[in-house]
Amino acid sequence: MNNKKTQLLILMMIILGLSSCHTETNTDEESTPDATTPVTITNINIEPIAETIELRATSQFQKKVAIKSNTNGYIDNITINIGDEVSLDQLLFTIKTKEASAIEDQKNIKDTALYFSGLLKIKAQKTGIITTLDHQKGDYVQDGDQLGIISERSSLVFILEVPFELHSSVKVNDDCKIVLPDNQVINGKISGVLPSVDAVAQTQSFVVKPITDLKLPENLIAKVQIIKSTKEKAMVLPKPALLADERQTQFWVMKLINDSIAIKVLVKKGIETNDKVEILEPQFNSGDRIIFSGNYGLADTAKIAVQKPE
């Protein structure tokens, strides 16, 4: 009899222990809150957007005037240096003729009819900048030899190399932006096109005239931005709001359905710029809330906590 009571008591203690463990487990599970992801949000904007192409261009002076000797003789004096700005009829070189150099002491000649200086002046035929000097003082030059080059500052253009498959997107008289190596942006206009294609690179050269007062040097490599297509009214999102798979074939955004849950919405994108992207499908309302930051790695349906931007 005592053995039966003892067995019954042990059985009751085991049942009570199991029940207690189950209750504690449930309590722990119920007390653990679901994980939420802090996010910031943005909205769809209806605004103009433009697709641009960016190509390399090199600056070049189109108009250059050669400074030439007009006699045989020795360069007696040079009044300019490379980089100097010169004006029309400014004195550039003085040349002593070969005959005058052959006379050792003309000052002792009393007959003035026999005396001549033999110095000839070379003046600038154009206003511009000295970009080349080919001779030094004392050099012997012949009639017609090139002494230097004057480049007209106003003739500086950028030669834009356009792959032939894109040539239809570049049109004469279109406006463009020129991005200099220091990231300074100036306006430009496509003023012409050369009627030939590079045989190796298969690029066609376009002439871009910079609209600026800057004194730009020759052989400066810049980037030219040309508008390829535009839309006046497009659904636009900031670029960080758009997510994509590894192959960049599927795109989506995380849209809030209430203050604590966001769902994955597949989208079709259109024009893309450096910081914005056009959404073609589906149609969103201006009041729809889209996750801007904190969206990376979120599941199809995710619990979120909206944070105020700092």
Image (cartoon, rainbow, N blue to C red):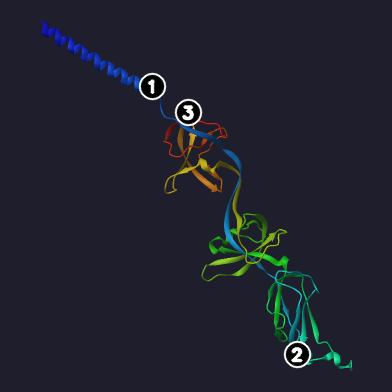
SS state under label 3: loop
What percent of the width, then of the height, locates residue 141? 71, 85
Using the numbered discs, state the Cα–Cα distance from disc 3 to disc 2 in whole angstroms.
96 Å
Q: Amino acid at mark 2?
A: Lys
Report the residue at 11% width, 6% height from top.
2
Which image quadrant for residue 64? bottom right
Q: Amino acid at mark 1?
A: Ser
Q: Contact, CB < 8 Å: mark 3 with mark 2?
A: no
Q: Contact, CB < 8 Å: mark 3 with mark 1?
A: no
Q: Earlier in the sequence, mark 2 or mark 1?
A: 1
**Image position of 20 with respect to 253: above or below:** above
On the question of residue 115 being in view, the answer is: no
Front residue of 44 and 187 = 187
Residue receiving disc 1 = 31
Report the residue at 22% width, 14% height from top.
15
Front residue of 38 and 98 = 98
Using the numbered discs, state the Cα–Cα distance from disc 2 to disc 1 in whole angstroms.
108 Å
Relative side of 73 to 236, left or right: right
SS state under label 2: helix
Residue receiving disc 3 = 260
What percent of the width, then of the height, locates residue 303? 44, 30
Residue receiving disc 2 = 98
Front residue of 225 and 185 = 185
Mark seen at residue 258:
none
Q: Amino acid at mark 3?
A: Ser
Which image quadrant for residue 177? bottom right
Q: Earlier in the sequence, mark 3 or mark 1?
A: 1
The crowd level at tag 3 (other Cα within 10 Å; few <14, some 14-19, many 20+) is: some
**Image position of 83 with respect to 308: above or below:** below
On the question of residue 14 being in view, the answer is: yes
